[in-house]
Image (tube, rainbow, N blue to C red):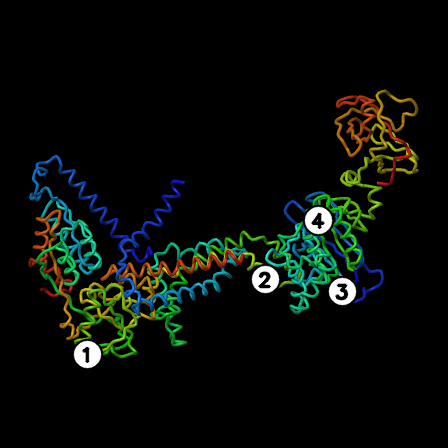
């Protein structure tokens, strides 16, 4: 039971810490003039920004967070990285987040459907690649090689975005692939390739790049049929709406794009 | 007393949470999904086989630890508890590094027998047994230490060889400890997630056990996850209660 | 009670050769057992000694449960000490019987025959015959915890004998029983030991058990044999304080010169003529006490102080200190007449005819 809910178990204390942190900030500010302002519109009064972002954004958003803090002295950016679906649930359950960056429109839709966010913007796209071990034991070089029953393939489970994308790409190519495993997230899928337990996997290009040296990425044309849009939105119940908007702007700026593209994302 | 009630509440409250949030109206059709039953069957089968494996390997190990003094026994005893403290995911990775296709032993298995454990039902059993075995070993070792050695001496004077002593005297004497250990072991194997998904992967009907199904359901359909959790809970509690009754009445 | 046992054992090898010859040496930190034992077929040897003397260690060494540091065990002319426990032709009755709690009385008795190769059916039949012999057939299906102490003891004896041992080892077989049961079981045990044709070694700290059950006593103290002989002989001529206490005699070492034995400052007249170091023993009942010095010979007479007075059966036992420590048994009436109290000075006298002197 514990193990199955481990992500929740990790997320819950994090959320509590966030709540505690926010209320602490509030009491710090209690003596200042800002407390009189009901809209809390002054930037000085909201010195903390909380961003919920898909796990695949861990490296890039951490970097952008530092940039943001440098540009806005006194502001502390806190991230909660995790599976987009889990994050979306946490937001709809009332987690105090300012910005949500999801790895799929579907997960963002959960949040917009609950009227917790409006008008998400696609800020970046991620494409699938075939990841193979450096020595490429099964000599894979195009998507149809994965349909060979002798090739051991790992895919993401269809419940997670990379799995949905993989199904879309394979359908587009008219291929029937029988994977040996449907992994719970893209990192786990990639790990199976890194350890050489499978001959190939369909993962995001960004993940291949982040595991540079341990896996080799192979582009395939059908990937264009299964491009994953990453939407971002500031949340309607954001404790720090101004900072939220500023952060979304940073992500959408040229500076933000540069960081993301360098990590393997396609510009939106 | 207060603390006991607090402890009880702490253990039971999450269960109550599941019951309260359970989508009772859609329960029947959710349970009837073939994937659900498939995962449940796989869970029960693998947990049971894993327990059997733990019994076969764990009882002699417990006997060794309890009865045979050898240099480094304390170290071995500490090593046995490793799966308890190791995060199961790490355990899964460790298993891959040893029994995986490129693992130390796995490589040899594949080249010699053309057989590879990861992504197979046998792999699920291996992962579950790895994580659950300490429960059995610790429980049986405790029972062995508590058992009166003189019964074994008495058996020897009656002409019983070591093996007969073990089978006809020691085993019956420590039977309650073995049963308790096996039950713990089975329960732990049934709930195993981290090592299983890491080592054996997740494929419906072959390696997707209930905990894995629950976890993935949580990604998209929390209600389904609750239903699956409840099902697993009800089935395991029913089986354990059944065993307990049987054991208590036969003793 | 017919003898259903199959007499499968060979005739004794060599005439007059004892069935069991053993030299048992077990070294432990701060303890060393070193005793020699011999036993003829059908003989019952009692190992008698205080707690910690090494009796049980000796028994365990015979059974093979404690390894010998040195020495040997020969049974029926063959070296027993080279065999592992389970291959020794022995039967052991343990102090608290150690009946297997998960097996019925019948299966406990059948355990040995089964281990020694009998079929399940034959083993149970043999076991049934043995339960019959100890009059417990109606309890065949009972689990050990349902048996009384005496019944458990009999099952344990049946279990030990059911393997047709050549050597029967009994460790305090009556110690766990209450006084009443003990009496009955002791006489039953005596009968069964009489039927047993192998050698029996019995460990006990109870002199009565030893006297009643054994043909030969071996007294062990501090890991060594201090005295051995027929029970009557040991009872009459104790050679250590422990044995003297066991058999209820006052015992002293002295020097004899003709019919006179000097023990410290006290001179005893005795009936035996001897020279040199001797033991002199007399029962507490042979001691008479006086408030004033009695007339007559100064021999067998000394002045003592009462150290303590206690009830002893129907009599009163008076412990005396003085030139020699003595126990005296007198009647309660005498205590009243003499008005004895602890700390009092009295005169003690022993009749020469009740003393017994023998070479040390």
Return the x and y of residue B9 as percentages of the image width and height: 35, 46
Mark toward the viewer: 3 or 4? 3
Q: Quadrant of the C terminus of chain B?
A: bottom right
- Label 4 sits on residue: C172
- Label 3 sits on residue: C5
Task: Residue A174: give its label.
Answer: 1
Task: Tell me if label 1 and label 4 are in contact, CB under 8 Å.
Answer: no
Asked whether the residues under marks 3 and 4 belong to the same chain, the reply is yes
**What residue is shown at x 82% (from left), y 29% (from top)?**
C331
Q: Examine the rendered structure and indicate whether residue A153 appears above or below residue C35.
A: below
- Rate crowding at label 4 as few (under 14), some (14 to 19) or many (20 or more) other CA atoms within 10 Å: many
Name the N-terminal-most of marks 3 and 4: 3
- Rate crowding at label 3 as few (under 14), some (14 to 19) or many (20 or more) other CA atoms within 10 Å: few
- Inter-mark Cα distance, 2 to 3: 26 Å
Work out whether residue C2 can be spotted: yes
Chain label for disc 3: C
- Label 2 sits on residue: B168
Q: Secondary structure at mark 4?
A: loop
Chain label for disc 2: B
Q: Secondary structure at mark 3?
A: loop
**What residue is shown at x 24% (from left), y 63% (from top)?**
A185
- Inter-mark Cα distance, 2 to 4: 26 Å
Q: Secondary structure at mark 2?
A: helix
- Inter-mark Cα distance, 1 to 4: 87 Å
Mark toward the viewer: 1 or 3? 3
């Amino acid at each position: 039971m514990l193990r199955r809910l481990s992500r929740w178990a990790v997320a819950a204390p994090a959320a509590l810490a966030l709540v505690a942190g926010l209320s602490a900030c509030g009491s710090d500010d209690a003596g200042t003039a800002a407390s009189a302002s009901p809209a809390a519109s002054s930037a000085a009064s909201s010195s903390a920004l909380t961003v919920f972002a898909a796990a695949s954004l861990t490296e890039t958003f951490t970097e952008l967070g530092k940039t943001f803090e440098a540009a806005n002295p006194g502001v502390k950016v806190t991230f909660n990285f995790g599976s987009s679906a889990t994050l979306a649930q946490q937001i709809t359950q009332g987690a105090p987040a300012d910005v949500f960056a999801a790895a799929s429109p579907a997960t963002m839709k959960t949040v917009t459907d609950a009227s917790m966010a409006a008008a998400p913007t696609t800020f970046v796209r991620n494409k699938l690649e075939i990841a193979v071990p450096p020595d490429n034991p099964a000599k894979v070089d195009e998507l149809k090689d994965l349909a060979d029953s002798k090739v051991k393939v790992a895919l993401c489970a269809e419940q997670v975005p990379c799995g949905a994308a993989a199904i879309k790409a394979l359908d587009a190519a008219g291929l029937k692939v029988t994977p040996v495993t449907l992994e719970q997230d893209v990192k786990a899928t990639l790990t199976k390739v890194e350890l050489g337990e499978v001959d190939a996997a369909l993962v995001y290009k960004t993940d291949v790049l982040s595991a540079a040296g341990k896996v080799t990425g192979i582009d395939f044309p059908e990937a264009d049929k299964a491009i994953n849009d990453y939407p971002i939105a500031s949340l309607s119940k954001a404790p720090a709406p101004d900072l939220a908007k500023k952060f979304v702007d940073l992500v959408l700026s040229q500076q933000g794009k540069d960081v993301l593209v360098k990590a393997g994302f396609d510009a939106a | 007393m207060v603390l006991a009630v607090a402890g009880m509440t702490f253990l039971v409250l999450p269960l109550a949470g599941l019951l309260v949030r359970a989508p009772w109206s859609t329960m029947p059709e959710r349970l009837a999904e073939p994937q659900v039953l498939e995962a449940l069957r796989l869970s029960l089968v693998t947990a049971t086989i894993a327990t059997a494996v733990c019994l076969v390997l764990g009882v002699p190990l417990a006997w060794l630890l309890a009865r045979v003094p050898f240099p480094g026994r304390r170290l071995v005893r500490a090593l046995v508890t490793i799966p308890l403290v190791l995060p199961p995911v790490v355990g899964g990775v460790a298993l891959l590094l040893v029994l995986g296709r490129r693992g130390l032993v796995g490589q040899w298995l594949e080249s010699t027998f053309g057989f590879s454990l990861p992504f197979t039902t046998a792999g699920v059993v291996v992962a579950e047994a790895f994580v659950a075995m300490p429960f059995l070993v610790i429980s049986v070792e405790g029972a062995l230490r508590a058992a009166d050695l003189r019964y074994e001496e008495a058996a020897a004077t009656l002409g019983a060889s070591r093996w007969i002593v073990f089978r006809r005297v020691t085993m019956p004497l420590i039977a309650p400890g073995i049963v308790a250990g096996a039950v713990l072991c089975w329960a732990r194997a049934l709930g195993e997630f981290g090592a299983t998904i890491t080592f054996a992967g997740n494929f419906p009907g072959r390696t997707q056990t209930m905990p894995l199904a629950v976890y993935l359901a949580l990604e998209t359909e929390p209600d389904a996850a609750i239903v699956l959790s409840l099902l697993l809970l009800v089935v395991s509690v029913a089986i354990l209660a059944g065993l307990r009754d049987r054991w208590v009445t036969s003793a | 009670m017919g003898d259903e046992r199959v007499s499968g054992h060979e005739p004794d090898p060599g005439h007059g050769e004892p069935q069991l010859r053993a030299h048992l040496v077990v070294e432990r930190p701060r303890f060393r057992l070193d005793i020699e034992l011999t036993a003829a077929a059908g003989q019952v040897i009692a190992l008698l000694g205080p707690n910690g003397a090494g009796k049980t260690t000796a028994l365990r060494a015979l059974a093979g449960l404690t390894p010998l540091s040195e020495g040997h065990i020969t049974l029926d002319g063959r070296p027993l000490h080279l065999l592992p426990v389970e291959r020794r032709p022995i039967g052991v009755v343990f102090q608290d019987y150690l009946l297997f709690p998960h097996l019925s009385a019948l299966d406990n008795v059948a355990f040995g025959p089964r281990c020694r190769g009998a079929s399940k059916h034959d083993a149970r039949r043999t076991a049934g015959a043995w339960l019959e012999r100890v009059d417990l057939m109606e309890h065949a299906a009972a689990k050990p915890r349902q048996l009384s102490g005496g019944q458990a003891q009999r099952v344990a004896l049946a279990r030990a004998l059911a393997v047709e041992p050549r050597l029967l080892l009994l460790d305090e077989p009556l110690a766990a029983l209450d006084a009443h049961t003990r009496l009955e079981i002791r006489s039953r045990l005596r009968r069964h030991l009489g039927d047993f044709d192998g050698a029996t070694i019995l460990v006990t700290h109870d002199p009565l058990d030893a006297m009643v059950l054994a043909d030969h006593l071996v007294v062990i103290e501090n890991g060594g044999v201090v005295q051995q002989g027929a029970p009557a002989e040991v009872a009459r001529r104790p050679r250590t304080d422990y044995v003297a206490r066991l058999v209820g005699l006052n015992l002293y070492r002295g020097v004899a010169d003709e019919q006179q034995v000097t023990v410290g400052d006290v001179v005893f007249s005795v009936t035996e003529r001897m020279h040199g170091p001797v033991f002199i023993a007399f029962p507490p009942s042979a001691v008479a006490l006086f408030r004033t010095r009695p007339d007559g010979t100064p021999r067998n007479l000394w002045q003592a102080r009462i150290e303590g007075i206690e009830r002893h059966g129907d009599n009163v036992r008076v412990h005396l200190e003085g030139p020699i420590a003595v126990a005296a048994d007198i009647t309660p009436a005498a205590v009243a007449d003499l008005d004895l109290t602890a700390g009092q000075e009295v005169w003690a006298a022993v009749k020469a005819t009740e003393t017994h002197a023998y070479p040390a």
